[in-house]
């Protein structure tokens, strides 16, 4: 096992990794920018290293500064968390090539393959995993988009090849929209991912977003930890996640999870990852969407129902150890939901509201887990993501989780910034959500909003 792990991140995920490492007896190194000198992740780590100014591109995205911090502090491994450099194949490769430092994540070559959506589709298709009908490669002209739409029908989705999180995704309803959508998708792909290439898929109109947590060691052992439903999204950004998915029957659940396990196993994947699918309930069909080659925000609900610490497993796998449990040992119990508590104003188009947490009293009690990156008196910075923390609520079944979640959200006290708590409470009160009648279009088209 490692002696010292540097966490190349900030906020709640940095705190989460630091806590997991410390439980394994590993020394921890936090990195920080000017804005984060006294941040919670810095206070929790054994050692802290300054890596640059407040602007992320000059600190948390500054690869050489982070590697130098690792060398200076004697870190023998780097955990990237999620966001920032977590899916940077170039950073992973730099760490892999650095003497005496281990990358806690998938190999850089595998990250590169799954980072290009057309390549990842081909990998999964070769492994026998169903994929959404789409072009076998990238497209260069409106005529190619038109030909695909003529064959498969409208709407179609033009997607950035290196994209994710809804960036570089444009839905085309008819032929007149093709040219503008193609140009916009290319422009966003270049701006966000440094890659203007795009491809085309059939657009599924009313899907659920269901993803599978996987763990794969370097000895060929692959396990899935069952699924999460992430259909409550705003502009392709997840806001509430739950497990198990209330839309799947047991047979479909087993088939979908087995497909995810099969796909990553044959792809040579190693470490933790998430295989994402779109599920059409009307046809009971699921289709591969993408692989997230990192820990995800919502890993917490998987831990809540399986009892398996995903971050500790990442550390064990990166250290070369074998998984110590079989697939049959993974027996989820109960249900769980995660609520992302952001410093945003849901009544003002979710505009960020940076500021100081004058009051911060997170909820407590039965079935409550709080993963946060702040304490009372800390400041939510305008430089970074507005996430305050995550409230993870578990119970015997979905009904108990729904009731408990309302109590949890009402119990929380946060003053000094606006938060997304009123939005979450409105969703919990909404009949479509409670009756499991929502899809990925729920927030944008079905939800009535706040009163």
Image (spheres, grey):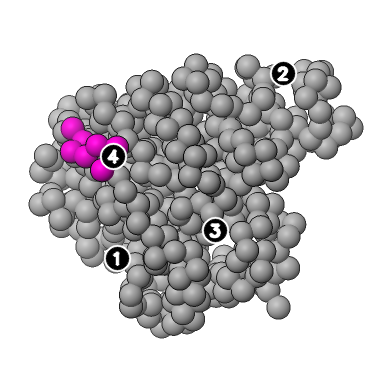
Residue at 65% x, 70% y is 430
Percent x, y of residue 34: 35, 58
Residue 50 in view: no
Q: Of the numbered discs in the image, which one, if any, rests on residue 140?
A: 2
- Mark 3, residue position: 239
- Mark 4, residue position: 328
Contact, mark 2 vs mark 4 (Cβ under 8 Å): no
Contact, mark 2 vs mark 3 (Cβ under 8 Å): no
Q: Is residue 9 left or right of residue 441?
A: left
Q: Regarding mark 1 in the picture, which secondary structure is present there?
A: helix
Which of the two marks, 1 or 3, is nearer to us in this view?
A: 3
- Looking at marks 4 and 1 on the same chain, the residue that comes earlier in the sequence is marked by 1
**121 or 327, nearer to the observer:** 327
**130 or 70, nearer to the observer:** 130
Residue at 39% x, 31% y is 261
Percent x, y of residue 390: 42, 64
Structural crowding at the residue carrying mark 2, measured as other residues with C-alpha within 10 Å and reported as few (<14), some (14–19) or many (≥20): few
Which quarter of the picture shows residue 315? top left
Structural crowding at the residue carrying mark 4, measured as other residues with C-alpha within 10 Å and reported as few (<14), some (14–19) or many (≥20): few
Label 1 and label 3: CA atoms lie apart by 23 Å
Label 2 and label 3: CA atoms lie apart by 34 Å
Label 2 and label 4: CA atoms lie apart by 46 Å
- Mark 1, residue position: 40
Q: Which region is colored magenta? A: 322-329
């Amino acid at each position: 096992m490692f002696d010292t792990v540097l966490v190349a991140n900030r906020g709640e995920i940095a705190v989460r990794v630091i806590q997991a490492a410390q439980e394994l007896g590993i020394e921890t190194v936090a990195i920080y920018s000017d804005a984060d000198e006294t941040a919670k992740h810095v206070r929790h780590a054994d050692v802290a290293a300054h890596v640059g100014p407040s602007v992320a591109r000059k600190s948390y995205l500054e690869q050489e500064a982070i590697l130098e911090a690792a060398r200076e502090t004697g870190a023998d491994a780097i955990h990237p968390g999620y966001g920032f450099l977590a899916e940077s194949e170039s950073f992973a490769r730099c760490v892999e090539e650095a003497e005496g430092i281990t990358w806690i994540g998938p190999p850089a070559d595998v990250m590169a393959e799954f980072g290009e959506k057309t390549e990842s589709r081909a990998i999964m298709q070769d492994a026998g995993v169903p994929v959404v009908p789409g072009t076998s490669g990238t497209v260069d002209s409106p005529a190619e988009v038109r030909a695909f739409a003529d064959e498969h029908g409208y709407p179609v989705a033009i997607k950035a090849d290196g994209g994710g999180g809804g960036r570089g995704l444009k839905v085309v309803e008819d032929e007149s929209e093709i040219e503008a959508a193609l140009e916009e998708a290319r422009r966003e792909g270049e701006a966000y991912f440094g890659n203007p290439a795009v491809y085309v898929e059939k657009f599924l109109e009313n899907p659920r977003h269901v993803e599978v947590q996987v763990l794969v060691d370097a000895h060929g052992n692959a396990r899935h930890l069952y699924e999460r439903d992430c259909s409550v999204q705003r502009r392709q950004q997840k806001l509430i996640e739950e497990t198990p998915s209330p839309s799947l029957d047991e047979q479909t659940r087993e088939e979908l999870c087995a497909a995810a396990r099969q796909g990553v196993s044959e792809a040579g994947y190693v470490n933790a990852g998430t295989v994402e699918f779109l599920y059409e309930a009307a046809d009971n069909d699921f289709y591969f969407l993408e692989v997230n080659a990192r820990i995800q925000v919502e890993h917490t609900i998987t831990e809540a129902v399986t009892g398996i610490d995903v971050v500790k497993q990442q550390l064990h796998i990166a250290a070369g150890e074998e998984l110590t449990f079989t697939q049959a040992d993974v027996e989820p119990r109960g249900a769980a939901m995660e609520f992302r508590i952001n410093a945003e104003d849901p009544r003002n188009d979710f505009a960020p509201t940076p500021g100081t947490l004058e009051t911060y009293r997170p909820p407590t009690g039965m079935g409550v887990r709080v993963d946060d990156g702040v304490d009372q008196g800390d400041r939510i910075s305008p430089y970074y993501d507005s996430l305050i923390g995550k409230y993870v609520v578990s119970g015997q079944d979905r009904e108990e989780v729904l009731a408990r979640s309302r109590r949890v959200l009402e119990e929380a006290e946060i003053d000094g910034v606006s938060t997304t708590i009123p939005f979450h409470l409105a969703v919990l009160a909404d009949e479509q959500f409670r009756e499991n009648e929502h899809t990925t279009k729920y927030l944008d088209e079905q939800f009535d909003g706040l009163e």
